[in-house]
């Protein structure tokens, strides 16, 4: 019966113009990452280089995506899938691309206690194949806490001034000083901190055997030292306060830490790091950007 149905896409167009990209976006697909099934949305398409062709065969792209269901997501799998896109559009297309958007759920332990909880990381993976050359890009978004070094220094100065005023002319006694340090009378100021975000846009080595999403997240969070927490007890909250105090950061500091961490990863061949500190002092954000490409 299908031979009797018209295929309008095979007809010639009245406007012979080649198109850079034609396809579909927002396709629901399941992925396999680290053995787990992850829900994702895909944008799949090819170039339409045959200017006289009316259109592409979108159903062929859709059906090709089924390969994602049963295989671990990897550079090799993406190359194979994009190759299928092009094979199904021989004579029409010279390049194919695929974007996958998903949320990676990682279980995170508390800093001190035995508690743990799930944390969500927004990920976007883009693959482009042209002339047998594969390009891979991975985007990750990481939340963390940042405490302002300037604010910390100003708070320390106020505490010193209050100490001078409260203990002027008095003989110092260790127990009195300890009690003063534990009181609101003594600690008259605290530094301000804010929830911050690191946006990592990385070019990956297309010859890599796997996609180390979780490892890259772990590496970046270790470099920052103040990843936001899930389930906590008071001991964990205290440990988090300690981590912030030992990792005072301007946005410039955070960008440099991430830059240094990412250049150590063999699978990363280039990146743009963008950090955004949602200021608690100002009504605007503080932002720093760093770029690098392997020579």
Image (cartoon, helix red, strand yellow):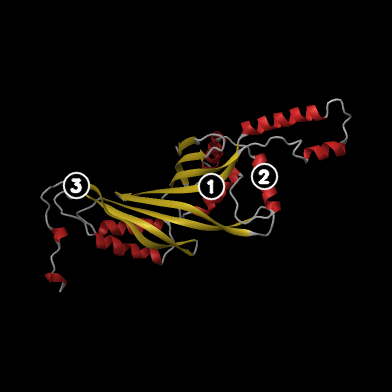
Q: Residues within 10 Å of mark 3 (few under 14, many from 20)?
A: some
The extreme top residue here reads: 169
Q: Could you tell me which secondary element the residue under label 1 belongs to?
A: strand
Q: Provide residue 77's location: percent of width, then percent of height.
A: 39, 59
Location of residue 251 by image quarter: top right
Q: Can residue 171 be seen here?
A: yes
Q: Can residue 207 be seen here?
A: no
Q: Is residue 247 left or right of residue 166?
A: left
Are the residues tagged 3 and 2 within 8 Å (C-beta)?
A: no
Task: Look at the picture and state if 244 lies above or below 82.
Answer: above
Location of residue 180 by image quarter: top right
Q: In which quadrant will I find the C terminus?
A: top left
Q: In the depicted view, which residue is nearer to us: 137 or 124?
A: 124
The residue carrying mark 3 is 18
Task: Look at the picture and state if 223 lies above or below 82.
Answer: above
Q: Label for residue 241?
A: 2
Residue depicted at 16% across the width and 71% down the height? 2
Q: Provide residue 274's location: percent of width, then percent of height.
A: 48, 39
Q: Is residue 65 left or right of residue 171?
A: left
Q: Residues within 10 Å of mark 2 (few under 14, many from 20)?
A: some
Q: Closer to the N terminus: mark 1 or mark 3?
A: 3
Give the Cα separation between the discs numbered 1 and 2.
16 Å
The residue carrying mark 1 is 143
Q: Closer to the N terminus: mark 1 or mark 2?
A: 1
The extreme bottom residue here reads: 1
Give the Cα separation between the discs numbered 1 and 3.
42 Å
Give the Cα separation between the discs numbered 3 and 2.
58 Å
Q: Provide residue 14's location: percent of width, then percent of height.
A: 10, 50
Front position among marks 1 and 3: 1
């Amino acid at each position: 019966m299908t031979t009797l149905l018209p295929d309008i896409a095979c007809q010639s167009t009245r406007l012979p113009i080649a198109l850079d990209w034609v396809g579909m976006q927002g396709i629901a697909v399941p992925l396999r990452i680290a053995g787990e099934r992850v829900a994702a949305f895909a944008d799949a398409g090819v170039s339409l280089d045959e200017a006289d062709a009316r259109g592409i065969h979108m159903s062929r792209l859709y059906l090709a995506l089924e390969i994602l269901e049963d295989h671990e997501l990897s550079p090799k799998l993406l190359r194979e899938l994009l190759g299928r896109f092009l094979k199904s559009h021989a004579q029409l297309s010279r390049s194919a691309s695929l974007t996958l958007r998903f949320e990676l759920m990682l279980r995170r332990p508390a800093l001190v206690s035995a508690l743990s909880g799930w944390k969500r990381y927004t990920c976007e993976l883009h693959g482009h194949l042209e002339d047998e050359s594969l390009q891979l890009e991975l985007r990750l978004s990481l939340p963390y806490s940042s405490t302002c070094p300037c604010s910390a220094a100003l708070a320390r100065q106020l505490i010193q001034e209050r100490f001078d005023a409260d203990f002027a002319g008095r003989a110092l006694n260790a127990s009195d000083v300890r009690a003063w340090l534990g009181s609101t009378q003594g600690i008259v100021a605290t530094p301000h901190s804010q929830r911050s975000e690191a946006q990592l846009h990385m070019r990956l080595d297309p010859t890599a055997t796997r996609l180390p999403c979780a490892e890259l997240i772990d590496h970046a969070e270790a470099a920052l030292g103040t990843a936001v927490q899930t389930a906590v007890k008071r001991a964990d909250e205290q440990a988090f306060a300690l981590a912030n105090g030992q990792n005072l950061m301007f946005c410039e500091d955070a960008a440099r830490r991430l830059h240094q961490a990412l250049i150590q990863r063999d699978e990363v061949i280039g990146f743009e790091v963008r950090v955004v500190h949602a200021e608690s002092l100002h009504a605007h954000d503080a932002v720093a950007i760093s770029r690098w490409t392997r020579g």
